[in-house]
Image: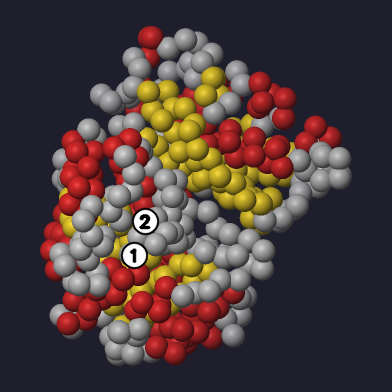
Amino acid sequence: MLSSETSRQALLARVLSGERRAIARVLTCLDDGAPGSQEVTELLSSHAGRALVVGVTGVPGGGKSTLVNALMGIWLARKLRVAVIAVDPSSPVSGGAVLGDRIRMGEHGAHPNCFIRSLSARGQLGGLSRTARAAVDCFDAAGFDRVIVETVGAGQSETAITSLADTRVVVCPPGLGDDVQAIKAGILEIADLLAVSKGDLPLAEETARDMREMLTLRRAATNGAWIPKVMVVSGAESKGVSELVAAIEEHAAVVGTGRRLTTNTNKATQMSGSSDTQSPDAERWLAHLSSLAQRDGICSTLGISVTEGGPGSAVVRMTVDARHMNFNGGCHGGAIFSLADTAFGLASNSHGALAMGIDAHITFQVGIRAGENLVARATELMRSHRIGMYRVDVARVESGGEETPVSSFTGTVYIRQEPQAKRQTGAVTNGLANGAAVPDVYRTAKD
């Protein structure tokens, strides 16, 4: 259906005109990975950037779907076109998903200006599905004014929504835990808006107070453009929802829309292998990160080398041989983890401040055999004064240069703002010696 350029252009034209059947067909093809879907993804992204993308995330059972339904109601009443992407967790046993988030959105499901699409996470880490970004671009290109992305029930490290949404709303149900839980870094740190849900419950105001106290302990945004707000809401009773919508619109006026497209451009520049797209200081960054890797025992033992790097990013490679094999004749999962962890450690320590891993998750998609080449690309999703969150994609490099996904890795670090001179040479974190200085051109006051 998407294999020819003519069919892709014809379907794209129908999507751009807002035809619902064409949108549904494209979303299915993207989710199934049909032939030509990558080309369609690129076509859609070139027409995207106008819609406001609102990410709604938080713990399971926190009231995300009910809140999304309430947000939809307000925007639809204002004659805006609203799309919802609801990501549901997939079963680790069967691989299936209930796709039940839309049950709480049935009130608006038949509205002509509304389109609700459920996606299965399919084991993807970070709280989103593999095709969530392409689905957002599809709705954006189709002329929707608001695209709401509801993640799976998220913990402290499911933060992929950071690089996708223009405005991130973290939903916190009352009584999350003691004050230590409130102060814990992770998902709460990515919030532009903290929405204490189920505002009719007795502990709602107390939880909101804890959240506000937490924010006073956090450094404000570097540019001072936006300070996160805490709001008490109740989707079921429409309490505080209008105020939340106003805050979302206010945040959008400050930061704009299409932030994910700028992020993609920056990543493409950092990760490209061609010399004409690398920054002028690429060689200095490569030398800096290579110096860290050369003093690391795991890198030398497993033959891991650094090929690219930048502020918050790193690319490492490894050729699988006898050192990496397990007793079943395949590549040891620990070796793949070490490759991903190396990229994670390099990227998180690239800024100069000592970063210590406090959380990591990994999934494996395919098996690897001796003689195959692996590449791991680490990308910084978010970095605050004390916490950094990173994603690493491991792929097998085929003979023709094409890549097959092998593993997905997410990690969180705690950042120690120690002066450079006070660090011990050879201090180890995330498997990386962290004694070398950052290139002076990238030194900042916070380092």
Q: Are marks 2 and 1 in contact (CB under 8 Å)?
A: yes
Judge left or right: residue 60 versus residue 174: right
Quadrant in which residue 112 is drawn: bottom left
Residue under label 2? 58
State the residue in front, 177 or 46: 177
Residue 64: mark: 1
User: Nearer the N terminus, badge 2 or badge 1?
Assistant: 2
Three-letter amino acid code at the position of disc 2: Gly
- How many numbered marks does the figure carry? 2
For the N terminus, the quadrant is: bottom right
Three-letter amino acid code at the position of disc 1: Lys
Q: Position of residue 226 (x, y in %)?
A: 17, 47
Judge left or right: residue 406 versus residue 84: right
Whether residue 224 is situated above or below residue 299 in the rendered picture: below
Q: Position of residue 235 (x, y in %)?
A: 24, 69
Can residue 350 be seen here? The reply is no
**Disc 2 to disc 1, how far (Cα)?**
7 Å
